[in-house]
Image (spheres, rainbow, N blue to C red):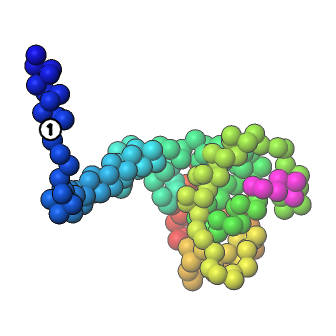
Amino acid sequence: MLLKRVNSRIRQRRPLPANRRRQKSPVIILLLLILTSLCLGWGMELALGSNGKPDLRAQASAAVTGTVDIVPERYRLGQQLYLENCSSCHIALPPEVMPTETWRQLLLDLNQHYGKRLEPILRPSLLAMWSYIRQFSRPLKEKEATPYRLTQSRYFKALHPQVKFSQPVRPATCVSCHPNVAQYDYRSLTTEW
């Protein structure tokens, strides 16, 4: 009985004339658009793992080795691999002293590393090292030549203003001013400085 009444009322309803049809409110459309944008932004934040705030916990818990920068947790494996691979043959330079492009070329061409052929590095290790180096190195200026020697790097020169070197600058000579380079400590200087 109830169903018959409902059906009869539905059938009795006639379509509204064109001038009385409901218009979609621009306010509702705007609110839906804003809500959709917020949901998409929140989803992208979750997907990319970024909250727009500095990672203070990582910085506070970061081990301060001797580098100029505090190394957050997510780059420590890359730093460790960099130190293991590079300091086994020579003093490991901080990424800050050479541009990113220099480091990229050095990591891409392990067959020609200053006249020596290096053992291949496993791709995951290479990617972790690259992530660390890319984060802490610096970009080249437009049309700037890529330096491959410390003396050619404007960053090295900027980090050593008005320093007169008593011997040719090479990674091996860093120890004359930075006695703790074996521990990757470039902050400590000899008493002369």
- Tell me the SS state at disc 1: helix
Query: Hey, which quadrant is residue 124 in on the image?
Result: top right
Which residue is pictured at 10% across the width and 25% down the height? 5
Q: Is residue 50 magenta?
A: no
Query: Hey, which quadrant is residue 61 in on the image?
Result: top left
Nearest the camera: 112 or 88?
112
Evaluate whether residue 177 shows in this view. no
Magenta stretch? 107-112
Q: How many marks?
A: 1
Which residue is pictured at 65% across the width and 43% down the height? 81
Residue 94 appears left or right of 5: right
Evaluate whether residue 29 shows in this view. yes
Q: Is residue 50 above or below residue 187?
A: above
Residue 52 appears left or right of 171: left
Q: Is residue 130 above or below residue 4?
A: below
Q: Quadrant of the N terminus?
A: top left
Nearest the camera: 104 or 186?
104
Question: In the rendering, at what x and y percent does residue 16 appear?
Answer: 17, 53
Question: In the rendering, at what x and y percent does residue 22 appear?
Answer: 18, 56
Question: In the rendering, at what x and y percent does residue 159 appear?
Answer: 55, 73
Label 1 Cα crowd, 10 Å radius (few <14 / some 14-19 / many 20+):
few
From the image, tell me which residue sits under label 1.
12
Question: In the rendering, at what x and y percent does residue 53 appear?
Answer: 33, 55
Name the residue type under label 1: Gln
Nearest the camera: 148 or 190?
148
Query: Hey, which quadrant is residue 10 in on the image?
Result: top left
Q: Is residue 111 magenta?
A: yes
